[in-house]
Image: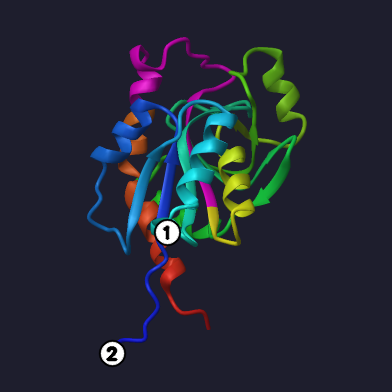
């Protein structure tokens, strides 16, 4: 009889239908264990409800959680299609440090050589950030903003200790503000990038399954 522990499952959380489509159509052959892709719905409250509900079920007990999808870049010089690996997520309810960021950066660079990968704090908002508010958030030290990552990771760690991370694709940046994601070149580019980086999530998950030395 095997005494090996069951693999830690992986929950990949996104908010939008177009993000969910990108994740479903990405390369899923590199999964190192059981995983679930969840569309939480838009906004921090929807993310909190969805993640809390899913982690309460036995199938995802102790699951690692990775928040992903699109984001707005805050730093000057960012472009649609750039990648953001959060060192931490933060919002008015708390700050959550992320795990395995160096590995994620390495895997993203391998999958998409030449694509810019930014690392730093990822801040949460309850609305779409535009205009001067972008520079105000950048002044706090954050490099990007979205509406779900901070709520997703905070809900995850409140449900029990577990590895968490957040990887986002810039779809909107200071010099490249978008109106409708699905009809603009930047949105199409971001969709393709998100679909391409799914194997990096599985490599991150696989690293968590390796025995610690």
- Residue identified by numbered label 2: 1
| Colouring scheme applied when the structure was drawn | rainbow
| Above or below: residue 25 compared with residue 129 | below
Q: The residue tagged with tag 1: helix, strand or loop?
A: helix
Q: Nearer the viewer, residue 158 or 133?
A: 158
Observer-nearest of 63 and 66: 63
Could you tell whether 53 is left or right of 114 in the image?
right
Left or right, 124 with reference to 197: right
Contact between marks 1 and 2 (CB within 8 A): the answer is no
Residue under the point 54% across and 28% down: 78
Residue 112 rendering spot, x and y as whole percentages: 35, 44
191 to 158, vertically: above or below: above
Q: Is residue 41 magenta?
A: no
Quadrant where the N terminus is found in the figure: bottom left
Q: Circle 1 is placed at which residue position? A: 58
How far from the left and from the top, in percent, is residue 150?
61, 39
Q: Position of residue 197 (x, y in %)?
A: 35, 45
Up the image or down, 67 lies above or below 184; here it is below
Give the residue drawn at x 24%, y 47%: 27
Q: Is residue 175 magenta?
A: yes
Q: Is residue 119 visible?
A: yes
Q: Of marks 1 and 2, which one's residue comes earlier in the chain?
A: 2
Residue 11 badge: none
Magenta span: 165-189
Query: Which corner quadrant of the image does residue 69 belong to?
Result: top left
How far apart are the two marked residues, 1 and 2, measured between alpha carbons?
A: 23 Å
Element on which disc 2 rests: loop
Which one is in front, 48 or 17?
Answer: 48
């Amino acid at each position: 009889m095997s005494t090996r522990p069951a693999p830690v499952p992986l929950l990949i959380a996104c908010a939008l239908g177009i993000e969910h489509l990108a994740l479903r159509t990405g390369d899923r052959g590199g999964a190192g264990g059981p995983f679930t892709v969840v569309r939480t719905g838009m906004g921090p409250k929807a993310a909190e409800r969805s993640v809390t509900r899913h982690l309460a079920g036995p199938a995802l007990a102790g699951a690692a959680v990775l928040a992903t999808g699109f984001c707005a870049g805050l730093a000057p010089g960012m472009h649609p299609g750039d990648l953001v690996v959060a060192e931490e997520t933060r919002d008015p309810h708390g700050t959550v440090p992320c795990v395995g960021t160096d590995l994620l950066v390495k895997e993203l660079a391998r999958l998409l050589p030449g694509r810019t990968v930014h690392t730093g704090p990822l801040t949460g908002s309850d609305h779409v950030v535009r205009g001067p508010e972008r520079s105000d958030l950048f002044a706090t030290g954050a490099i990007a903003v979205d509406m779900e990552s901070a709520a997703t990771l905070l809900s995850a760690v409140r449900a029990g200790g577990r590895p968490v991370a957040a990887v986002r694709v810039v779809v909107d940046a200071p010099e490249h503000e978008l109106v409708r994601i699905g009809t603009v070149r930047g949105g199409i580019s971001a969709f393709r990038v998100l679909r391409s980086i799914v194997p990096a999530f599985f490599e991150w998950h696989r690293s968590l399954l390796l025995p610690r030395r």
